[in-house]
Structures are given as C-alpha cells and as structure tokens.
Amino acid sequence: MSTLAPPMFPKPAPDAATASATGTVRPFGVTLALPVTRDVGTEWANTLSYCPERQLTVTADGQPFIHAPSMKTQITSTSQTVEDMQIATDTENDTD
Amino acid sequence: MTVLVLTRPLLDGVADMVVTELTARGISVCRMDPGDFPETSTLTAEIGPGGWRGSWRGQHQDPVLEEITAVYYRRPSPFRLHPGLSHDDARWASSEARAGLGGILTSLPCIWINHPHHNAQADFAPLALATAVRCGLRVPPTLITNDPAEARTFISGLPGKTAAYKALGTTGPGSRNGEQYALWTTQVRADDITSDVARTAHLFQQWIDKQYEVRLTAVNEQMFAAEIHAGSDASRADFRRDYDSLTFRECGVPDAVRKGVRRLMEAFGLRYVALDFLVNHQAAWHLVDINPSGQYGFIPELRDPITRALADALQEGEAR
C-alpha cells in the first residue's frame, strides 16, 4: 500500500487478524511464488550511502551510484525487481 | 519554486537521475522520505485561504509547503514509528500519520507525478484493465475468480489451453523459512488449478504467443517505447525474472495505441505511466500491465530522454 494514499475500497482487514502465524492452507496463486536467489535490497547496503548535499545514493568512494559503470546494471535490475513488485515491501508499520 | 521528491534515500536510481537532472538545471530540489515521519521529521502546517501553509523539517531538507510547485512521487518508505509503541498504538499512529502528513501533502495544489491517489486507483488491476478496454486498448481475454471450476473452464477454452496467472495486487508473497519469495507471471493449464483458488481472487489471462514485449513509458504527451526481446525461458515468461538475458530496441507506437494510452492517462489523471504490451505474430499490441509508477531505468537507450521529459514536466510547475 502506498505510504500516502488512503486505503482503497474495501478497507483492508486489520493485520491478518484471522490468520495463524504459519497457516494450514495457502491460496493457489501464492504457491506459484519462487524464491529470490539474490538478496535483493541488501546486497549493496554495505557499500552505499546517502549524500545529503547531492540528495542521491553514492558509492564508498563518493561517486553517484547511477554513474558507477560496474553497478549500473545491478541498480537497474535490482531496483526494478523490487519496484515492479512481487517482492514484499510492507513492514510492520504499514498495516492498515 | 521547489520540486519535492518523495522517496526512500537508497536504491532508487530513477529518483537519483531525476534529482541530478533538476539540480543541473538549477532547480531547487528537496528529497524527503515520508518514512522519516514522525520520528525524524517534523511537520507543522496551518490552514489559510490558499490551503495548507507551513514546513516539513527533515534531517537534511526543510521544504516550505507553499513554495512547492511540483512533487515527484516515487517510493516512500512506510512510516517508521517509535519502537516503544504497542502493536495497536503503532497501527493507530500509522493511520494518523497517513491522514496527517499524507493528507496535507496530497492537498498541495501543484503538479504531481503522479498524485498517489491517482496511482492507487490505476494500481487496481481490474479497474485499470476495464478502463484500458474503454479507452480502446486491446487487453487479452481475462478472468478473475475464486471458483476453481470456472478457472479450469476458462483455461480449457483458450487457444493453446494455456493461461497466464498473475497477482492482482501490489503486495508481495513474503518469505518462508527465511527465504524471500517473488511472484512472477506464471504459465498455467487447467490441470494445474487446485481447490485453493477458492482462498482468494485469482486473475487468469490468455497466454499470448508473443514475438516480443514492449515497455511503453509515457510522460504527458511524450511516449518512449522499446521492444524487449527475451533471451531465456525465464524472461520469456516474465521479463523481470532475468534482466541479463534481455535486449532492447527502440520502436514506434501505433496511432491507435498512442490514442488509447492518452485516454487512459486522462481517465486516471496520470502524467506518467509505464505500460507493458505483448506483441503477437500478427503485430497486435496486447496491454497486460499498467504501472503508474513503474521505473524506466532498465532500458539504457531511454533512460536519459525519459529523465529529461520528467524534469520538463516537473519544471512546468515553475510557470504556474
């Protein structure tokens, strides 16, 4: 769910209140999910930081990540994979 | 003027490109993550004749609400709340944050790419597909059901007796046994369908025997399209599964598709949209995915033109 948009009709159920932690049945669709082979979203975490002056992600040597040739393919595919969904991005704070 | 960029700080290459372009043009940019609210950013706003006035003070930027002329809405984090809150209090605080910060920001009378309320509507696949059909775009035969028998009957009646199963919403399947899972477009036949289709709504679509896919990205009236040629079995089913195998070629957009896309954008109030089409062997374009905030960085040839078009569109707010 978008951080700023209101919950759309119908209002989401409160935080899986009816479900057990593990579950005994699964919807058909979710059984088709495949494991993600790469640690998406965290594999670069140790080498990247946010530059508040330039307002973008930089590598360990201060180069803008989008201009780092060795990482360009990685950032586009990694962020695309995360963004065009199908990988959980919800957190415990985004439950309503 | 100030362009407000709403997104998380890391791993948003598209936001980085747009921020870089706007900065190079000398435009004031404030990049903020709503997820910093309420613990590491502070909002103070009062209503007046022109709407909300005030400031949103962050860790690095302090945008003044009435100076914001455009908002680029990317991928904000969820609100990060105080860890000492109980589960119920956190849920309540998150809802209040959405209504408070979200309500004030979304009321700003400026250019939005895109307004999150519009995105939310266009992200609803059934609404988006129905609107696309009404706008004259070709959509593959599609069934949404939680009836396993209806699903089997539908798939059995398709050419090739094969369907694509796709998730309807934007929530991922989560993790199991510590492993993260992703849900891609999956080929299914009637025999694959189980009684667990009854557990929730499922979307099945005719499996299109495609020559290639097209990613069409539109910014206002400008359209940028590229053929996507898959080089592996995984990427032929869903190109997102294997980016390394893809090759791209810029292409034109048929007039009928162009008109349909413009109508679709107007129907949802979108200034930006990324659309996925399957092009069959008769060269017919079938719309299969509507991504109101899909990213465009993965097609190298289109990266810079789309970035410039977005900056142009955000800069339009300056003239208002």
Image (cartoon, coloured by chain):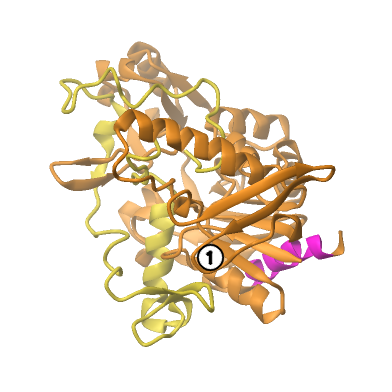
Chain colours: A yellow, B orange
Q: Residue B211: x percent and y percent? A: 50, 52
Stretch in magenta: B305-318
Position of B126 with respect to B50 (left or right) is left
Of the pair B162 and A5, the residue shown nearer to us: A5
Q: Residue B155: x percent and y percent? A: 40, 23
- Looking at the image, residue B214 lies above or below residue B29: above
- Looking at the image, residue B46 lies above or below residue B155: below
Can you say which quadrant of the picture contains the C terminus of chain A?
A: top left
Of the pair B311 and B140, the residue shown nearer to us: B311
Residue B248 seen: no
Residue B238 seen: yes
- The prevailing secondary structure element of the residues shown in magenta is helix
Q: Residue at x 52, y 30 (%)?
A: A7
Q: Residue A87: x percent and y percent? A: 34, 46
Q: Residue at x 71, y 44 (%)?
A: B46
Q: How many marks?
A: 1
Q: Which residue is mark 1?
A: B14
Position of B74 with respect to B173 (left or right) is right
Q: Residue at x 47, y 38 (%)?
A: A1
Q: Residue furthest bottom?
A: A61
Position of A27 with respect to B47 (left or right) is left
Q: Residue at x 55, y 28 (%)?
A: A8
Position of A31 with respect to B105 (left or right) is left
Q: Residues within 10 Å of mark 1 (few under 14, many from 20)?
A: many
- Looking at the image, residue A75 lies above or below residue B111: below
Q: Indicate whether residue B165 is drawn in magenta.
A: no
- The part of the image, by quadrant, that contains residue B131 is top right
Q: Output the chain of dot 1.
A: B
Of the pair B104 and B14, the residue shown nearer to us: B104
